[in-house]
Image (cartoon, rainbow, N blue to C red):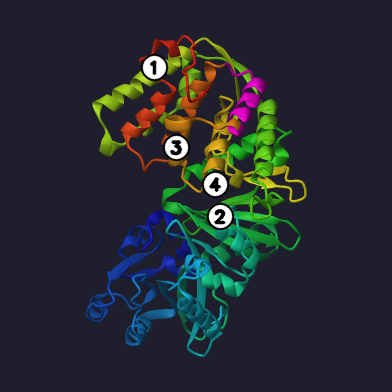
Amino acid sequence: MQNDANSGWLYHLGDVIFGDVLLIDAEDLFSVLSIYASNVYLSSKSGFSNARPSFNISGFDCVIVNSTDGVLPEKHLVSEIYETLNDNGIIAVIYNNDTSYKNITSLKYPYLFVKKIFNIYKCLFSEKINNKKTHVRYYMQSIYGRINEVFYRRNYQSVKNPFLLTEKIKKYLFSRVLFQVFSSNILDITIKGSNSVPHKTVIDNVIDNVQIETGCKFTDILKCSIIPYKVLVSVASSAGGDYIFLLLRGADRNVRANRELNMLNYLNETYPDLSPFFSRLVTSGIYKNIEYIVYRKISGVSIDAVFNDYHIAERAAFNMLLHIGEVSRKKVIFDSDLYYEMTDTWFSRLDHEDQSSAKFEKYLDQINHTLFSSLQGKSCELVLYHGDYKIENLIFNASDYTVNGIIDWDLSEKHHFPGLDLIYLIIYSRRIKNKTSFIVECEEIFLRDGFNRHERSMLDEYCKHFNISDDLLPVITVFFIIHHFSCRERSGYTNIWLMLLLESVWNPDDESNIHGVKKPGILQ
């Protein structure tokens, strides 16, 4: 149904996930529920009736039924499950819509479209309360096979892949009702009991705790985005301005998120000229076994359909990169300590265990040694390195599209080579423009056609600004490839493919690399 990394949607069930939980046809949630719950039990829709007497428990706090295969639980089974619930216990059924935006925009299935509209008005997004139970429905948008975003009380705002047709449709057409049409997963929650108090999610409870702790009055949840191993919640306050709540699974603390917190504190202290572009910490803590971090949200807009010309945003991002580099640049002399600080565990993480070979291990050792030899004792400039510098991680001023802020500092470094972030910007921009993947664009650049004229112009301007010589650019490019495929993208390619990619820029057997002769082709 859903893997552990993308299980943040469980927070919508509320604090019942910390009690006794039964999973029906949802074995893949066992490991993550074992982190949250007091006890986890397994069963199936077909075997529940017979297995029921064997459960040595007075009642369940939560029963999760997986119906993504299209087989919804029959009424008699729901009634039987309902009888096993404790007071205020929950039955949560997750299932797929019978249509999606792809069907609607292509108009291939008008019958299903009309049927879905009928179902929406038949069962509106609301809480229906009687003296026996409360019913809540969440309509969730699935992106890349994940339950990704949930509607709360206001209109949906797009933040990812904004130049695709689907995002433009969402930008201009989404009302609360239309969101339900476009959603590909539905989470139905039935709460046992006559309590008319609105259903509270784990997210609601974390927000309540922070209100008590800080004195801030939060008025509305604007959006909840579920991404691997964390949940991002945008929340409005009565005093004006929005906040970002970052929720992390407690039992395997998200190292990257905590690293980002430390990095932001460092950046705000070290670079006062850049501080307006960074988020600021409000508070952090632990609710039950879920860690949370609260930031002030940077004012402005995420990149979305209001940009009619992508080059406007791209140029603004480039100008911001020049500014960051100018403020943070410093000269250093390379030695072994600095080199290994900058590469850290990058090389060891490149080697896929299932594809490991003596040839590839030897190649990594060789390229590691050759890179160090080419840099040792040399003077060069280093700058602040974001590590994931793409348009989607920038906040823009809506009036003139200048950059108001930069988010997602979890892969950043206090200092590294200038140019790494620019190559990220170029490749991520190509990915959006061409509607492809990062790997495909790496192949196009490094194994086929090289950078195009516009990209080459940006590289030339940047290299001139930071005095990057022709022999240093291939070194920087190799560091970029090593960083991305050791820290960002760990699947979808082979060790042999990665070796070809690196060799297209830097061949450790070629002594000319050490002596500063630029390889022809890709980087010219």
Among numbered discs 1 and 2, the one appearing first in the sequence? 2
Which secondary structure, mark 3? helix
Nearer to us of marks 3 and 2 is 2
Label 4 CA crowd tier, 10 Å (few <14, some 14–19, many 20+): some
Question: Which is more N-terminal, label 2 or label 4?
Answer: 2
**Mark 4 or 3, nearer chain start:** 4
Question: In this figure, which residue is indicated by the disc labeled 1?
Answer: 369
Q: Residue at x 65, y 55 (%)?
A: 305
Q: 206 above or below 68?
A: above
Tell me the CA gap for discs 3 and 2.
Answer: 27 Å
Q: Is residue 130 left or right of residue 497?
A: right
For marks 3 and 2, the one nearer the N-term is 2
Closer-to-camera residue (222/500): 500
Q: Which residue is mark 4?
A: 432
The residue singled out by tag 3 in the image is 487
Q: Is residue 110 magenta?
A: no
Amino acid type assigned to the residue bearing label 3 in the image: Cys
Name the residue at 32% across, 61% down: 28
Foreground tag (4 vs 1): 4
Q: What is the magenta segment's predominant secondary structure?
A: helix
Q: Secondary structure at mark 2?
A: loop
| Residue 259 x, y percent position in the rendering | 53, 40
Q: Over which residues does the magenta segment extend?
A: 454-469
Three-letter code for the amino acid on which mark 1 is drawn: His
Circle 2 is placed at which residue position? 164
Using the rendered image of the protein, determine whether residue 291 is visible from the camera's viewpoint.
Answer: yes
